[in-house]
């Protein structure tokens, strides 16, 4: 699958073999078929708007639109599309980490660009950059992760990270992370974009 732009194509990795991860979607919608239909309908509308606008804009506007598309795609389990949007946002990897209400651990619910073992990682609140963000409710923008003692390495190539809290009714329920293989890859605008 590719997103087309005159003279350029953005390829989606071949390993993504299904357009929607139905197991993920069922988990996100508490296995409610009507809610699944509603969520997919919203996603389709967002994707159609993004398809129209994505290559008509550039720079920060493209990053913002790609971020919105990536978030919507991750929510419904459209992994291939989320990976493509992450590339347009210039992140090397990204993840949505939620607090498991049963055991209180932070667990990766959706990710792109992380090793397969990453989905088995469970962090305590306060552990690592992600746990720190979950504990404090404050974002963390780190230009050189090797210099931050909170950082827990999943990919040795990562140089910078931006993590923001995901809140529901003023309560932190998880963390959204984006990583880059470039130092100081994220700025205040990127942070504001992730927090929106």
Image (cartoon, helix red, strand yellow):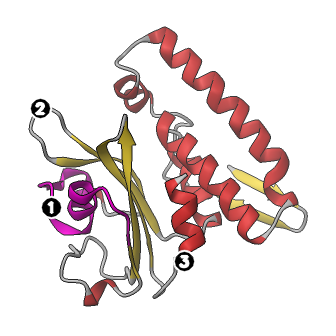
Describe the element under mark 3 as helix, strand or loop: loop
Which residue in the protein does label 1 denote? 126
**Is 104 placed left or right of 170 in the picture?**
left
Q: Residues within 10 Å of mark 2 (few under 14, many from 20)?
A: few
Q: In the image shown, does 138 or 8 lie closer to the viewer?
A: 138
Which residue in the protein does label 2 denote? 102
Residue 187 is marked as: 3
Q: Is residue 62 magenta?
A: no
Marks 3/1 in contact by CB < 8 Å: the verdict is no
Q: Residue at x 72, y 30 (%)?
A: 45
First in residue order: circle 3 vs circle 2: 2
Looking at the image, is mark 2 or mark 1 nearer the viewer? 1
**Looking at the picture, how far across and down is residue 166, in whole percent?**
38, 47
Q: Toward which corner of the image does residue 54 lie, by quadrant?
A: bottom right
Real-space CA distance between mark 2 and mark 1, rounded to the nearest whole angstrom: 17 Å
**Looking at the picture, how far across and down is residue 75, in whole percent?**
48, 38
**Is 129 placed left or right of 175 in the picture?**
left
Q: Residue at x 12, y 32 (%)?
A: 102
Q: Residues within 10 Å of mark 3 (few under 14, many from 20)?
A: few
Q: Residue at x 30, y 55 (%)?
A: 137
Q: Is residue 41 visible?
A: yes
Q: Is residue 97 visible?
A: no
């Amino acid at each position: 699958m590719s997103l087309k732009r005159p003279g350029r194509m953005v390829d989606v990795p071949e390993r993504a073999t299904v357009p929607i991860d139905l197991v993920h979607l069922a988990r996100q919608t508490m296995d409610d078929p009507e809610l699944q239909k509603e969520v997919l309908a919203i996603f389709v509308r967002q994707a159609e708007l993004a398809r129209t606008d994505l290559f008509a804009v550039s720079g920060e506007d493209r990053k913002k639109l790609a971020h919105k598309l990536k978030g919507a795609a991750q929510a419904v389990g459209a992994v291939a599309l989320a990976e493509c949007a992450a590339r347009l946002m210039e992140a090397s990897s990204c993840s949505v980490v939620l607090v498991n209400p049963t055991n209180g651990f932070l667990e990766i619910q959706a990710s792109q660009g992380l090793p397969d073992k990453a989905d088995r990682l469970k962090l305590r609140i306060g552990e690592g950059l992600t746990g720190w963000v979950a504990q404090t409710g404050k974002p963390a923008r780190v230009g050189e992760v090797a210099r931050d003692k909170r950082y827990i390495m999943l990919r040795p190539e990562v140089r910078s990270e931006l993590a923001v809290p995901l809140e529901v009714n003023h309560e932190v329920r998880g963390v959204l992370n984006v990583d880059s293989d470039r130092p100081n890859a994220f700025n205040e605008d990127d942070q504001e974009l992730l927090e929106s």
